[in-house]
Image (spheres, rainbow, N blue to C red):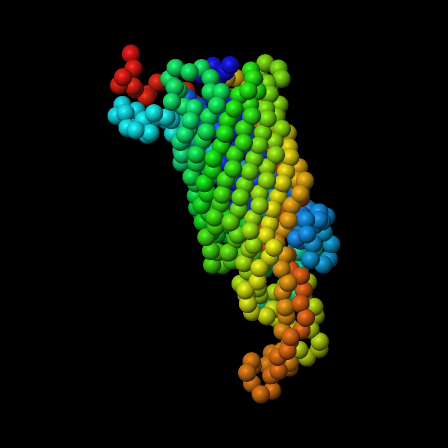
Amino acid sequence: MVSIRRVPGIAAAALLAAAMGPAAAQELPPQLGSYMPLYPGLYFTGGYVHDGGDSSYDQQGKKQPTATPQTPGGSTRLGNDSLLAQFTWHFPLFEAYQLPFVSSRTWLARATLRYSRTGTSGGLADYIASDAGQEQDLQDNSSGIGDVSLEYGTFLYGSADWRTSSSHPLAILALLGVDLPFGTYNHNAPNNPGSNTFALQGKLGLHWQPWSGGFVETGIGYRHYQIDEQPEFGQLAPRVQGPELRWDASLTQRVWHSLYLGGFYTQRRGSSDQYQNPQFAPNAPPPPLGSDDFPTPGTYRDGGTGLSTVGASLHYFITQRWLASLDYAVPIAGRSGQFTLPFTRRTPANCVPGALTCSEAADGAVLVDGMGPARSFASDVVTLSIRYNFGQGDAFSCANCKQ
């Protein structure tokens, strides 16, 4: 079994798993020991995540060789490279007071900071460069700091004997979290580090050690999003993002001394997204000479989003306090938000609505790609992380323990 001093080193690689904010559509894989009780102390993880964003799934779940299938002019790429800094504290709470439920277990607090470099290329970048006659000041990228994630929770089972136990064969972790929309956000860009909306989440995780050096974990969570009052890219991103159910499972085994190898599966299912008064469409039909075409104002919905991935993880202890990890995730199924957007023709061009000489009529409809969180990318994701376990020392005195 794993010694009490070894446990923090093994599980600290999991600290990136909580950084599942909607910013830039990044979804980090579950890591070794995500739901394992750790010896009280501070744990820091720094990570780099690369997502090429050069392919996606359409509403029917078919993989497309572009990030925006409905944009003409060639394949579109919505790339994202992110740096993360995460701080996690494990601690007893009011241990000396023997409060029911509170004092008999360890607690967890976590903060995740992000910085992302985003970019847009291909057909959508060409559309932005041409401006396509739109009045919006469209831009192709918006790099900067990402949203801040905060989590707080406790181990419902498995941490009561943290002072004396050298192993945690079974544990259950409950977490509540919030994503704060502090990230850089340009409503004229299709690819942003920030989300411009709050997200609330709850999660339950199970940790199990069925044999020596083996770790089985699974977690299920629910996320709810607040209204985005200024959806990105001409309001082609959802104003109301549908709530999501998320599930992950992983199996990791020590294969040689300080080397661990694992595999994982993740799944995200989001309900219908709502769009309000889109302002344009990259694939809009050109109006006849002497007329204007514009999207018909209204509320539109897509059929929901989703993404399933499988992947492999490699973890190596450089020293007992330093751990390097490499994760490679491959999407295997998904669904992006798309909706049908009708257009209205106004004749003559630039006429005043309601005037006797200004006529309006329906002018067909086009299938439009939802932007922002409505995109589910089919590109592989590489995550490289390194963690540091700060010196622990026993700063948590126990009134009823022998000194």
Furthest residue in direction top, as rendered: 403
The quadrant where residue 105 appears: top left
Apparent side of residue 232 relative to residue 149 in the rendered image (left or right): right
| Nearer to the camera, 255 or 45 | 255
Apparent side of residue 199 relative to residue 308 in the rendered image (left or right): left
User: Is residue 228 visible to the viewer in this orientation of the structure?
Assistant: yes
Q: Relative to residue 292, is residue 372 depicted above or below?
A: above
The residue drawn where x is 49% and y is 36% is 18
The residue drawn where x is 62% and y is 17% is 255
Residue 143 position, x and y percent, is: 55, 47
Apparent side of residue 202 relative to residue 294 in the rendered image (left or right): left
The residue drawn where x is 47% and y is 48% is 224
Residue 280 position, x and y percent, is: 61, 65
User: Is residue 349 visible to the viewer in this orientation of the structure?
Assistant: no
Residue 373 position, x and y percent, is: 56, 50
Q: Relative to residue 229, is residue 400 depicted above or below?
A: above
| Nearer to the camera, 196 or 247 | 247
Q: Relative to residue 199, is residue 357 depicted above or below?
A: below
Q: How many marks?
A: 0
Residue 360 position, x and y percent, is: 62, 79
The residue drawn where x is 70% and y is 68% is 285
The quadrant where residue 246 appears: top right
Furthest residue in direction bottom, as rendered: 356
| Quadrant in the picture for the C terminus | top left
The quadrant where residue 176 appears: top left
